[in-house]
Structures are given as C-alpha cells and as structure tokens.
Amino acid sequence: MILDSNILFQNYFSDNRNYDEVLKSNMTINPNWETLLENINHIGLKELINKQNEVDWLMDENGVTYNVYNDPKGMRRPWNLNVVPFVIHENEWKTIEKGIIQRAELLNLILKDIYGKRDLIKKGVIPHDVVFAHRGFLRQCDQIDYKTSKNLLIYSADLSRGPDGRMWVVNDRTQAPSGMGYALENRYAINRAVPTIFKNIHVQHSSSFFYSFNQMLIDAAHNNKDNPNIVILTPGPLNETYFEHSYLSSFLGYPLVTGNDLVVRNGKVWMKTLKALKQVDVILRRVDDVYMDPLELREDSYLGVAGLLDVVRNQNVTIINPIGSGVLENSGLIPFMNAISRYFLNEDLILPQIASWWCGQEKERQYVLSNLSNFVVKRIDRSNRESLFFCEFLDANQLEKLKREIQSSPYRFVAQEKISFSTAPDFVNGRLEPRKVMCRTFAIARKDTYNVMPGGLVRVAPEREDLHVSNQRGGVSKDFWITTDKSQTSMHQYAWDNTCKISISDINDLPSNTAENLFWSGRYLGRAVVTARFIRMVLNQMSNAQFNVQKVESEKLQYLFQSLTSITYTYPGFVGEDNEEALKNPLKEILSVIIDDKRLGSFAQTLQSFNNSYYSLRNLWSKDMWRVFDGIQKIWSRFIDEKKYAISDLIKLLDRIITRLIAFMGLIEESILVDQGLLLYFIGLQTEQAMMNVAKCRSLLVFNLEDQLQYEILESLLTSHESLTIYRYSYKSYLSLENVLNLILLHKEYPKSLTYQLKRIQKDIDRLPHSKNAAAISECQRLIKEANTKMENLNINSLLELNDDNTLRERLDTELSELGDVLHDMSMAISNTYFNHTYQQTQLVNQNFPL
Amino acid sequence: MIGQTVLDYNIDISPTPTEISEKLDFFGNTVTRFSIQQYHKELKVTTNSKIRRDYSLQPNIYDSIEGKSITLQQALMALKSYEEPILAVRQFALESILIAKITPEIKAYAEVSFKPNRPVFEAAFELMQRIYTDFEFNREFTNVATPIHDVMKEKKGVCQDFAQIAIACVRSAGLPARYVSGYIETLPPPGKVKLVGADASHAWFSVYIPKFGWVDFDPTNNQIPKNQHIVVSWGRDYYDVPPLKGVIYSTGKNKMKVAVDIRPAV
C-alpha cells in the first residue's frame, strides 16, 4: 500500500517524533493495522469526513454526554468519538490480558492484606507509610470481612505503550472505575455509522464480558442469590459520567439510585420505594470511598447513606468495589509492586510500570531531590492535575517550593521518570494526525480469577503535543479493537434500543425518588404546554388586532394580558397598581414571562424545571425521547442566541416548542410502563392540567362582560384550550358561556374537561400502592374523591348565576376556588405519602473536615 | 489501661434507641453506636462509669534513666525500626486529618524546644510549659472546626487546640504524638462545696518516647496528668475520637449541652 500518495496520511510520518502504533521504528507499517488502513483508504477522505459527522451525530442523537464539573457550559457536553479505531492484535493482547489479571489479583491481595493482617508491612515488603500516610487508607474499614470471592471486584488499568514497545501500566483505578458504558456505546456507534471499516477484520466482542459482569453482580448478593436486589448508586445528574450511570442502569436492568433513595435500618440497607422499604443486596457504586457514609466518613457528603459502613461490617450488603479500595490508587505502591508480586505469587510483573521513586525512603529522596527537574512528581494519593508536577516545566522558584514540600512530608510524594508514550492515528481536520493515546482496560472478578474486557476505552490527547490524557477537559475517545484471525459471530445488538429493560417487577418497587421525578415531570410538562398555548393565543390576538405598541387598543387585550399574569402567577405583571408600564409595552412584559428564567412562573422557568426533573430519569428514556428533548433545547438556545423578539418570532418559537412537547407526551406514554411509574407521570400531568383549567376559567369567566367582549373572551379561552373546533362540532352554535362551561368543565366524555380529568386522576390514584389496612382509604384517595363529588354536584344554572349587582359570578368563582384548593391539598398528600421526605441531613456536631 | 480500671459502666439514652451496638475502633477505643428512628425533640445520652484511678501504678518516666535521657537524635534512630512496638506507633508521626501540612511557623516553634542532643522528655515538658504560657485559654475564639494554623497565629483556644498544637510540634520533630480525650476533675475553691456538673471534657497530648513508652502532658494545666485526669480514648487528633458525633435528619437547628461530674465513689 502506498501511503505517501494518500492525502489522509500527508505529513503523518514526517511530523512524527514519537513511537507510533502504525509506523514502526524501521519505517515499516505495523501489519496489524494494515487492513484497517486499507479500509480507511478505501473509504476515502470525503466519505471519512461524512462518517465522522455521522458518528458525531449519533453520539448527539443518543445523548451520549460527558459533564464537566465547575463549567456551566460543560453540562451535557457531547462525547467525542474519533472515527478511526485503535487496534491491538490478539497475539499481543493475550499477554496484556495476563498482565491485567495478574495485577488485578495482586491489588486484590494487597487490599485484603492492608485491611487485614498487614503482613506486607510487618515483613517489610512495603513501607508502613505508603499505606498509613495515604488518605485513601480508611481506618474505619479495617478488619472487615467480605464474603465475595475477591475483595477487589472491578479493576481498571490505564495502559500506554512505552518506548520498549510494550504496554505499560500508567494508572490503577480501583474505587469506581468509569468508562465501560462509553466503551460499549463507542463500539455501537462505529458499527452503525461505519460498517465498512470492519471489512476483512475480525474484532472481538465484549458481550460475554458483560454477561460475566452481570453474573458477578448477582454472585455478590451472597444472602439472596435467587432474587437479588442490585442497585447502581450515582452521585446524580451533575456527575461527569452520569450518562454512563444511566446507560449501565438501562443496559444491565438495575435501578439507578442516589444516596437519598437508600436508608439504613435494623442493620440493613433499604431502597425507599412507593410501597415500602425494599432490602438492597448489592450496590454497584459510582460514588467515591469517602462520600459513601456521612456518619463514619465525610460528614458533608450528601451522596452516601448514613450508617452504610456498619451494614458492610455485618455483611448485610455488598458494595462494589468495597469502601476503602481507594488506598490502591496509590503511586507509592509502584516501586514495590514487583516485590509484592514475588511475595504473593512468586513471579515477576508481566506489565511494566513507569520507573518510580517513593520519597519516603532516604536514598530515593536524595536521588529525586538532586535530579528533580528530570521527574514527574505526584502525591501518592492524588491523581488530579493540581497534584501532578511536570518538573521540566517548573521555574527555579516553583522547584524550590516543591522541594520544600517534599522535604516536609516526603512520604506523600513519588517521582516518576518522564516517558513519551506512543501515538496513534487520529482523524483531525480532514487528515490523520499522530496523537498520544491511553487505553483504559477493565477486569472483573469471576470465581478464582478475573475476566478482562476485550478492548476497552481509548482516550486521545486533545492536542498534538499534549502530555495529559484526561476526560476532564472533554477529550476524544476511540473504539478499541482486539483483532483476531478467527472469524467472529456477527455483532450483537446492544441493549440501548430496548428501552425498557429496567427489571423493576412492579410499581411497588419503584424508587420513590424516581416516582417523584416522574410526578413532577408530568406537572411541569402539563404546565409548559398550557402556558405556551395561552401565551401563543394572546400573541395571536395581538397580531390580529394590528396591535399598536403605543396604545392598548381593545379592552379584550387588556383583559387577556391580566389573565396571563394570573394564570402564570407572574405578579405584578399586568395586574396591580403599577401596571401602566406593562400595559404600555405589553410585548416587553410577555417576552419577560417567556424568557426570563429567573422569574417565578415564567415559561423559561417551567421548561427548566421540566428539563431538570426529566434529565434525572434518563435511564428510562427511549432514543426518540432524547431526540425530541434535545430538539427543544436546541430550538430554545437558538432563539436565545438570535435575540429576535417580534410577535411573529415569539409565535413561531411557541409553535415549534408546543409541537415537540406534545410529541414528547405521546412518546412518554409509549415508552415507559405503567409499572415503571408512568402512573405518577399521568397523575402529575392531569393534576397540573386540571389546576390550570381551573385557573383559566377563574380568570376569564367569572366577570360579567358585555356581549361582544364576552364572545371574544370565550373564543380566546377555547383557542388556548385547543377546543374551538370541538366546540363548533358539538354545539354547532354561537359561543355561549353556558355551552363553554358545559364543554370544558362538565363534559363527561371530553378528555380536556375538568370532570374527565378529575375522574382520570381518581382512577390512577386508586392504582397506586396503598396500605394494607383496606378499611382506611388514603388521604389522596379521600381528597380526589371529594373533588369528584364536588364536580358531580355542580349545576350549570347556579354556576351561571350573577351576584346582586350583576358584576360577577360569585358562585362559579367560589366553586372553582374550592376545587383548586382541594387539588392543591391532594398534590401535597401524594407528595407526603409517596415521595421521599428525608429531612435535611445535618451533623449533630458540626465538624466538616476533609478526609 | 494500667493505672485506670473500669469497675462499672452503663449508658442510658432517651428516647430508647432502635438499635444499639458496641465495637472497638482502629485505635482500640470502645465505640457505642445507636440509631433512633422516631421523632424526637431532645436526645439525652448519659453514661455512668465507676473508675479506679491510680496513676502511681503507671510506669514513671522519672524512674526510667533510659526514657528520661534519650535524645531526639537517638529517638529518631530508634524509630526507624520495623519491629513492634515501634511499628504500631509509626502512624502517630504522620500527618493526620486535622493536623496536616505542618507550617514553618509550627516547626520553628517546636525547634525552640526540640534539639538533636536534648532529651526528648525534657523538650516535650518544656513545650507543654511554653504552650501554657504563650497561649491564652479562650472559649470564644475557637470551635471544633478551627484549623490549628489559626490557633497558632492567634495563640488562643481551648484544651483541644493546645493538645493539637503540641501534637503538630512533636510530629514536626519526627516523633509520634497522639491526642488523648478524657475528663478532668476540678477542685472547688477552698471551703466551697463542689458543684454538680462543674467538671469538664478535656484533652491533652501524649508523646511516644522510645525505650520507655507513651508519656502524657496536659498543656492546658501545665502538668503531667495524674489522678484528676480520666482517659476516655485516644487517636491521631480530635477527628478520631469526638465524644459524640452523628447524623440527624431535621428541619431546624440543634444545640448541644455537655455536663461532666466526677466525684469519689462511695
């Protein structure tokens, strides 16, 4: 293959100063990459650009995101996947795999020893301080026994290829390693977007690895193997890898919970569900060690469960990985790993590591201090950038400062040789460029050994010469291929498409936090639709009236403006004494009600609340739902960016958003099962719509208006209710207040009537789990029944009655106001009965210390 | 513990806890944990212990020529050992949660007393005296979360601050030091009757002197603890051994009141 003539490879080799995966040192092509390069060549530059776009689009469409902490623009950042995969041949991989298994086993034995007999220290294999000075050594976890086959159940190693051509271990990840879900999604996306790139290449699948992974979770439930309750504990939607947490939750079919969903009682851990507490057997955690238990570990943590550690001690729950395994993320161990391997296994390390000097030893410290600028210095217990010193780039002052720090607590520092790791081709700006890569690999404990995922997650340095490879800055990833000469069975379908894999057996087991989010999603969605439609109606009336901004032309508009304020509850707005300004320039006020996200009751705020409660449920979403959800976000941000605020622009915005909200409502109903909590969503939605219905009627129909105005207001109401056509069809007559009330309040068959909505709520509430005491009906049931009885007793004639001075319909107002109150109480009752009302967690004695 | 024996002990908690259990922590202290799962406005924890305290049974540093005279330099050499009992005390020479990042100020303050050829005991005794003299006892200035660097700067605090400053100093010299939490008996002014609850929670520090063992010092009262000091627990610093801690779920604020009463057994 002639590469030089290919534009894709232009300058690839001439610029390359490092060891490269493709180009060997004798300037020949690595045969393991040959077929892939041929395929890429065959696809060609133009098509490769298309394919990369398609991959980007897929990632975006599927909502594969990565959040960046402390960066408002970093939320839901799309995950970047480069179209060019990373390749390792099976022959080499077999050795790497052995090396990973060996290292996993060693770390497992170290973990057992550190929190057990501490023979490694007593026999002088590792220095005392490497363990005792490491912040991850949690004395609270000392001498805990575990019933699982291994103490370390998941292990992740970051590998890079060193100058000797072998893969080296760069980092060990042992607390809650991330990346498996991304690896899975990467394969899915490449397979779908660029199937031709696999031509004549056999790539190993990871399906059997995930099968073992699941089996490992089940086996970890030693008390309850037949019907284990396994949960995935996430820090929440703000976490960097929340996408992956929800992805794994759907993929594996286990509920995604936050610390707040769990509680410790009677020596066990329980999940708060709609019905009752349900015992938890296994927690697959994505929360770091010290945040797991605010009682014994970090007091300021809201991510864990108070008292959890004692449940672990009593062997009533399995945490994966066990709390305290962070002590293994310890660069101070590196210099001693080979001795440890000889001690435990009587063999040498298979995978090389970076040469490292622990400064707690005198000779090593002297060596490091006198050659400091040649090293990369790290703290033994920190791998973040702030604790990483690339000494060659430090000036004299900085070096001096670092020296002093090392001297004051030498045992906390390790110096490492600086290594230039290999590069691999990355498709950037229309050509291939060599970029540094790091491979994250995964192993899980199975019986007496470990299973390794074939491949893993490859991350690419964002800049050509960048030394760091990290996701924190939203770097690029690659699909990681282990190629084999044997042909593989066809690609397995991954589970992303089967939306409903959550194995919650019935609604009783629904985590109450999920239930609450569903309920509020329903309420906010209902509110968003009703509000948008009402504002749209008002805007349409304004443009119909050839609205003149200088002067309020008609009484009708003024009337509608004021009802807009009261329905959205954006007082003072058009109501109150100081309303002149607003009435003079109503478009400005309406614009603020639409886009001011700081304003209570604004459309922007409702939409924001909806987004938040919905985003925390994303393990329940289907792909279509993500697409529509994302569509709304995009329309909204484009609108905010364009700053075009003419009436027609606002109407267009609302039109487009309403259509998508309605699409969303339809999708929810077909994507989520009633037992998964759809019921709660329905109750929320109907409750909100009923309350908005009451609010609209109260603000528009109570006052007695002269005929023409009355007619126009009725028409506006029906328009905002999307009921004008139905009205005409049903009554075939001039708009009358009597018929309008009959249709939108009293009609028994019309789904948008209050009567119908309340009946539906009652039916849904009856299906919720209720206490066993059948005699007592719940407060929620009592209240909705009260509302329905009230509805049944309404009489159209008395609703139409005017008070003595003929100004208003007091009876209508009273009835509606009472109904509104009952609905409000009912919503509160649902909240009190079913949702998780943990009080604020505080410390008995305030002692927030960093652990 | 030699010189202090528990003859009788009981704990009374109201409201009655749903669960209660006892275990030893990493440092060998007894920890009682309980959980209350009912609404309550007041939590009351009362412990009664009958203690036989006789400090004269403890090894006395003044009787140990080796312990009394070992210099800092000799002590640091001895501490390089990987044998027990040295191995067990090594962790008390390292940074701990509340005593981390020992500043040059603390190191300089320690170096006034700790010199390579001076006996460790003498240096530690002098450190205790200096803290007693240089620091002002002030309840208003600090709370349990005040960092030692602030205490060092302002030279104000309570017993636990003084103990932690001393520990930081001892560790800056490379020696193991631990935090002792306990109670102290206060004696009424001559001719007055002792008030109930007038005694107090107290804290002091202890230095490990090779060839001898742990020696306690009370910088708040400028003395080596004797029979008025009742030891409850020890750890690397206050964080390891708070008398009471916990998580509560509530909406309002909470206040804590502590009273200690020590009197001769009848």
Image: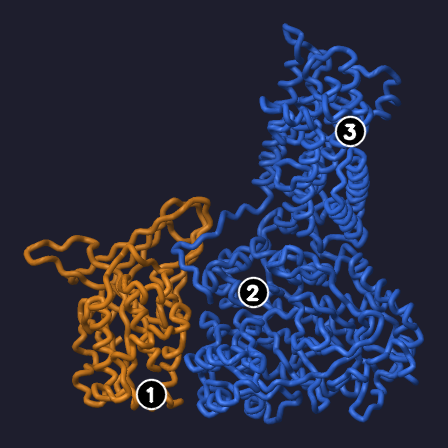
Chain colours: A blue, B orange
Number of dots carrying numbers: 3
Q: Amino acid at mark 2?
A: Val
Q: CA distance from mark 2 to mark 1?
A: 44 Å
Q: Amino acid at mark 1?
A: Leu
Residue at which label 2 appears: A317
Expressed as whole percent of the image width and height from the top left, the position of residue A114 reads: 49, 80
Mark 2: few/some/many CA within 10 Å (<14, 14-19, 20+): many
Please name whichever residue, A173 or A358, is drawn nearer the observer in this view of the structure: A358
Task: Output the chain of dot 2.
Answer: A
B55 vs A239: above or below: below
SS class of the residue under badge 1? helix
Q: CA distance from mark 3 to mark 1?
A: 84 Å
| Marking on residue A537 | 3
SS class of the residue under badge 3? helix
Which image quadrant: the N terminus of chain A?
bottom right
Q: CA distance from mark 2 to mark 3?
A: 56 Å
Residue at which label 1 appears: B76
- The label nearer to you, 3 versus 1, is 3
- The label nearer to you, 2 versus 1, is 1
Expressed as whole percent of the image width and height from the top left, the position of residue A173 reads: 61, 75
Write the residue at 63% across / 31% down. A569
Side of B86 relative to A206 (left or right):
left
- The label nearer to you, 2 versus 3, is 3
| Residue lying at the far left of the rendered structure | B191
A323 vs A653: above or below: below
